[in-house]
Image (cartoon, helix red, strand yellow):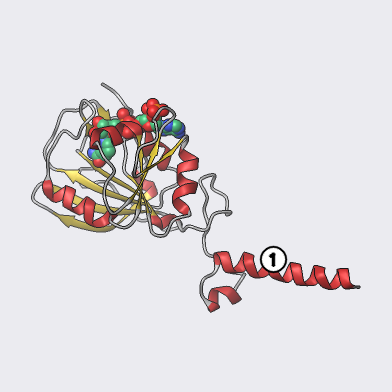
Amino acid sequence: MQADNQDVVFSGLRIFYTRHLCYNSVEKFNSLKTPKPCVSVSGDRRGCMDIKDMIIMVAMTAERVIGRRGHLPWNIPEDLALFRNMTLGHALIMGRRTFESIGKPLPGRTNIVVSRSMKPVAGVIVCRDFSQAVERAKRLKGKVFFIGGYEIYRQALPVAGRMSVSWIKKDYAGDCRFPDYDHEDWSVEEQRDYPEFVHVVYRRKCTDVSLSKGPFGKSRLSGHDV
Ligand SMILES: NC(=O)c1ccc[n+]([C@@H]2O[C@H](COP(=O)([O-])OP(=O)(O)OC[C@H]3O[C@@H](n4cnc5c(N)ncnc54)[C@H](OP(=O)(O)O)[C@@H]3O)[C@@H](O)[C@H]2O)c1
């Protein structure tokens, strides 16, 4: 009998914690029929971060050029300021080469570097694979920004819910491009014109049918090439 009562207490506690972890308002707590979207990197519902808070952040040309010889091919302070404002206080996930190109952890943000080879660095969380980095970032408060380069964007495209793209107006030569992706999976949420780039925030479509293309139309090139 006592064991039965303990079972009831423990299962009550289990339900409480299960609900408490995923529902942070009384209304949501009471409504188990409409769960908040909880997406993990494997696409299941174990994690509790909304995919809209997992954001790809990139600057690219119309031909999807993102880098040249390990660095950005351009120097656009206004875009760097936008990057800083949007990411301050949040977590950044980057590849080892992008970290090396930046040269130091970015202040005011949690810097997570994905690398199999990198030695520990002060101010940086090194994760040995992409999904470990995402799981680590999801345990932190705030949004998760995937800030490049190509290899990180490629792995982030299936899991991100937003893309913040600075479409650079001028053409630049480069040896590294943003991965090919289907523009029709994304719809425009915000768009703002700057002298040297157009900043567009895209949201992953769920059921809506609005078609979106970058301001320069669908990119023709694909892959990480030289
Ligand atoms: N325009 C933009 O917005 C923008 C933003 C960022 C970067 N970039 C440019 O992008 C270029 C760099 O891109 P990239 O693709 O060459 O390099 P990257 O993505 O920055 O880094 C690649 C490295 O990350 C690690 N990595 C990636 N996926 C991993 C996984 N699943 N497990 C373990 N380690 C993993 C590996 O490091 P190890 O080899 O140590 O294992 C790999 O060599 C540069 O030109 C940079 O300037 C442009």
Residue 172 rendering spot, x and y as whole percentages: 14, 32
Quadrant of res 103: top left
Q: Nearer the viewer, residue 137 or 103?
A: 103
Residue 51 rendering spot, x and y as whole percentages: 44, 55
Q: Residue at x 13, y 42 (%)?
A: 169
Looking at this rendering, what residue extends furthest in the front direction? 122
Q: Is residue 129 visible?
A: yes
Quadrant of res 180: top left
Tag 1, which secondary structure? helix
Residue 183 rendering spot, x and y as whole percentages: 34, 44
Q: Amino acid at mark 1?
A: Arg
Q: Residue at x 23, y 51 (%)?
A: 83
Residue 32 rendering spot, x and y as whole percentages: 62, 70
- Quadrant of the image for the C terminus? top left
* Residue at mark 1: 14
Q: How many neighbours does mark 1 have within 10 angstroms: few (below 14), some (14-19), or many (20 or more)?
A: few
Ligand 1 location (quadrant): top left
Is 79 above or below relative to 18? above
Is 213 above or below relative to 192? above
Q: Residue at x 32, y 39 (%)?
A: 148
Q: Nearer the viewer, residue 77 or 33?
A: 77
